[in-house]
């Protein structure tokens, strides 16, 4: 017989990872990896929203996969996210605010949620330092990867933008139209992610998997039956910056990262 996790058991697992109700947390998730939960995805969201009721709970609601020159109209009320079941359900819940970024929006819940997502329609890059992704470090946020690895850790894109790593963005922006809360549309010129090696550089981010663990920037945990990686946004930035000081393009040009690059200050 399959074991079904309860909402309270999921909350206990969050506590066991050292997370606090007041934390700012960005969740990347695989519902399939979590396994059987008594009331399915609704209980998962209830557990997260109740546990972080005093903090700031965030999920990506990306639309980069479908948004393009041929499909440039972004309506945050109706456009589905391309990153799984939980974000699509989360962004429709009462009290959740979605940012107005045409390709890399997030949904947020908590006392500061509306303020945190404000102004994303004024950006020109996917994960700008002054945007929701770049400011995770300022919030001393955690990134919780539930059943996924750093290949889905969008924050690392933000770190690379902060570090101004070359060869990450298209030379020319794409013109999008973003629907504003008052029903009007705003033109947004947005650069897309680009690199000369692969369509998705994030597929290379796991070369830092052990490095982040070894430096304390990340640790292991569990949520349901999913294996988790709990990251500290500031430490992920510091370790990535340390490695990038040896080779800014290491995620493209290295197949593995020399241990001394990330451990030299330890």
Image (cartoon, helix red, strand yellow):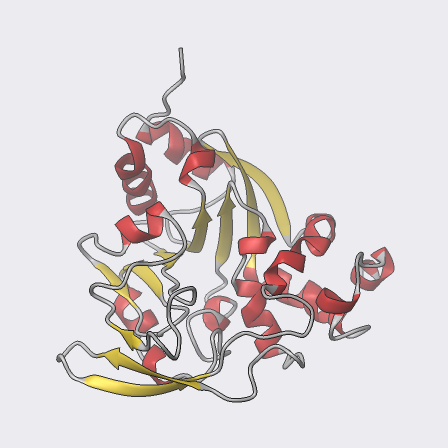
| Residue for point 62% across, 50% down | 218
Residue 210 higher or lower than 8, as above or below: below
Residue 174 higher or lower than 63, as above or below: below
If the image is split into quadrants, where does the N terminus sit?
top left
Q: x and y percent of residue 34 in the render?
A: 44, 34
Horizontal side, residue 200 vs residue 32: left or right: right
| Residue for point 50% across, 54% down | 143
Where, by quadrant of the figure, is residue 31 drawn?
Answer: top left
Q: Is residue 174 visible?
A: yes
Q: Nearer the viewer, residue 77 or 225?
A: 77
Q: x and y percent of residue 174 in the render?
A: 42, 84
Residue 208 higher or lower than 133, as above or below: above
If the image is split into quadrants, where does the C terminus sit?
bottom right
Q: x and y percent of residue 68 in the render?
A: 39, 75
Q: Nearer the viewer, residue 195 or 121?
A: 195
Horizontal side, residue 121 vs residue 219: left or right: left
Q: Nearer the viewer, residue 56 or 205?
A: 205
Where, by quadrant of the figure, is residue 101 drawn?
Answer: bottom left
Q: Residue furthest left?
A: 182
Residue 140 higher or lower than 16, as above or below: below
Q: Residue furthest top?
A: 1
């Amino acid at each position: 017989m399959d074991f079904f996790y309860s909402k309270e058991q999921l909350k206990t697992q969050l506590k066991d990872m050292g997370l606090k109700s007041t934390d700012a947390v960005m969740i990347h998730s695989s519902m399939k990896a979590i396994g059987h939960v008594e009331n399915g995805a609704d209980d998962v969201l209830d557990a997260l929203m109740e546990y972080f009721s005093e903090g700031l709970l965030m999920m990506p609601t990306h639309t980069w996969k479908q948004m393009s020159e041929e499909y440039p109209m972004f309506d945050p009320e109706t456009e589905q996210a391309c990153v799984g079941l939980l974000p699509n359900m989360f962004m429709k819940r009462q009290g959740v605010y979605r940012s107005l970024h045409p390709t890399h929006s997030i949904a947020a819940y908590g006392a500061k949620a509306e303020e945190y997502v404000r102004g994303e329609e004024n950006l020109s890059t996917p994960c700008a330092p002054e945007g929701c992704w770049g400011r995770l470090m300022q919030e001393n946020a955690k990134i919780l990867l539930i059943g996924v690895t750093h290949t889905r850790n969008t924050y690392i894109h933000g770190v690379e933008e902060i570090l101004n790593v070359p060869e990450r963005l298209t030379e020319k922006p794409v013109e999008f139209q973003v629907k504003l809360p008052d029903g009007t549309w705003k033109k947004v010129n947005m650069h897309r992610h680009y690199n000369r090696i692969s369509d998705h550089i994030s597929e290379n981010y796991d070369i830092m998997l052990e490095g982040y663990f070894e430096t304390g920037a990340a640790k292991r945990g569990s949520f349901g039956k999913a294996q988790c990686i709990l990251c500290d946004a500031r430490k992920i930035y510091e370790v990535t910056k340390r490695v990038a000081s040896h080779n800014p393009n290491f995620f493209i040009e290295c197949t593995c990262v020399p241990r001394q690059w990330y451990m030299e200050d330890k």
